Image (tube, helix red, strand yellow):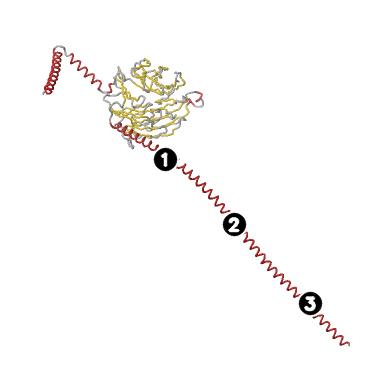
Amino acid sequence: MGKRKKGSKKYLVMLFLLALIVGGSCGLYYVDTFYGEGKINTILASLQERKKEQIGTVEEGTDKNSIALSSGGTLFSTKGKKFLMCTKDGVKYMNSMGDQKWNDTFTMTAPTLIEEGHYWAVGDLSGKVVKVYNEDGALYSVQSTGNVLYFALNRNGYLGVITKEKEIYTVMIYNNEGIQLTGRQEGEKGVYPFSLDISDDNRVFTISYLDTTDVEPVGRVNFFFVNESDGKNFTESMFSAVIKENELIPKIFYLDSGNLIAVSDRALYGIGSDGKEKWSIELTNHIDYIGVEKKKYIVVAYGAAVSGQNSRKAGNVSWINSDGKEIINFQAKDGITYLNCNNTGTVLGCNKTYYGLKIGGRPFWEYTATKDMTDVLLMENVNNVLFVTNDNAVILNMDTVSQDTTVKEEKEEKQNTEKVIRKQKDEEKQDDEENQNKEENQNEEDIKSETEENQNESKENTENNKDTENNEGAENKEDTEDKIENQTKEGEKEKTENTKQTTKQEDKKQTEKDTKQNESKNTQKDTKQEESKKTKQES
């Protein structure tokens, strides 16, 4: 009974305290809203709002990985973890978000930013200035009398610029100190330079033209030596040309291999450093976008089909090497609306869905943005990505954001496959080592057995040789004895025959002798008889 009373008292105390807390809170909230202008309510709402901001979309970023943009049209170029940003008012080079290394101010109407190797160039299209930078800041600036139409860099910081003043087109080539090396004027009516590039050995610059002086348009790619000493044996230093009738060639660029790629409205061409065509790929689709990945692969995003041709599906992207061979292709869900290539890989866009691919076209992530993006660039690896909108730039790690399932599942499947393959390789390696050890042990045993067998065989051969020698000796001895016996018998036989023959001869001689003696006796007897007869007669 005592324990029950004690428990019930505790329960009543807890119930009272709970009612007091609830009542006090309600009273405080009432007093705050009625008399205190809702200060407590404002604090609670502020806390909730801050929590929402933290949980909000990752594209807003944080102070550490994002930067606010004052105006639209900001251009970006990434270099590992660092990046360069360009506006109409100048450029800034950032070691990271919030860590500026240097800046340069200018005023341009329509700035265009290009990158090559460790150099950048910013040119004012339809203006008259092009400025060149490296990671340490401004290198040089070139000023033209005509308006800038096109400019290009090589990986050594050499700059080529096409300008137009009235009806005269001028092409100028500068070294990495801003010194003009050569130039040419294109004054022929109906001939228009479209594009140019400089080889990475600094020896050759190449220009693509549209020639409308004939009935049908002609696309031409002309090769010139940069130095006068190299081109002294050629007219205007031009040593080669590739001509394509009824074609436009609006884009040319060099690859690491030294091959020049010419992009036509009908085909892609690979041209060697000697200025001769090496390969071509006929186009069955229009090209929506084209880029260069690490100066190694041409990335082509195909659009609508060419009439009457066996075409690819819209959204197909092809990776082509410097020999003109397609190494891989990627099929997006829809037509390509964005493409950006750099030394890390490629980003493809289909409206708000973006794909990140490693060098050589290997899919790595897929992401659907909630805002309109003006730029999406890979940084030091495919996972770290710079997303740019009109008012914000944020660096996201793709492992920490929600992604669409297509590439994610493909990535997980690939990772699982790689794990299985790695495990299989480890097991195979372990089996190979075990088999190798077994083989080595077996080889040692075989060698030992073979040695013993050879020794036994050698011993047996020795004994057999001895037995053979003994047997052969005995056989030889027997043969010799038989031979001697046979010879003896033959000798005796011969001797007997000789003896018989001699005896016969002697008997014959004796007979002849006896015959002669008998004849002689008879003759003598006859003679005596005749003489006796004769004597008798005479008497």
Give the SS element for disc 2.
helix
- The residues tagged by marks 2 and 1 sit, at their Cα atoms, a distance apart of 55 Å
Tell me where residue 91 appears, x and y as whole percent. Answer: 36, 17
Tell me where residue 353 appears, x and y as whole percent. Answer: 29, 28
Quarter of the rendering occupied by the N terminus = top left
Q: Amino acid at mark 2?
A: Ala
Q: Quadrant of residue 93?
A: top left
Q: Amino acid at mark 1?
A: Asn
Name the residue that disc number 2 marks. 474
Of the two numbered discs 1 and 3 in the rendering, the one whose residue sits closer to the viewer: 3
Residue shown at 27% from the left, 21% from the top:
60
Quarter of the rendering occupied by the C terminus = bottom right
Give the SS element for disc 3.
helix
Q: Amino acid at mark 3?
A: Gln
Tell me where residue 416 appears, x and y as whole percent. Answer: 32, 34
Q: Quadrant of residue 19?
A: top left
With 436 as the anchor, is 466 left or right in this view?
right
Front-most of 8 and 172?
8
Mark positioned earlier in the residue sequence (1 or 3)? 1
Name the residue that disc number 3 marks. 517
With 151 as the anchor, is 387 left or right in this view?
left
390 to 518, vertically: above or below = above
Residue shown at 63% from the left, 61% from the top:
483
Name the residue that disc number 1 marks. 435
Quick one: which residue is furthest to the right in this view? 539
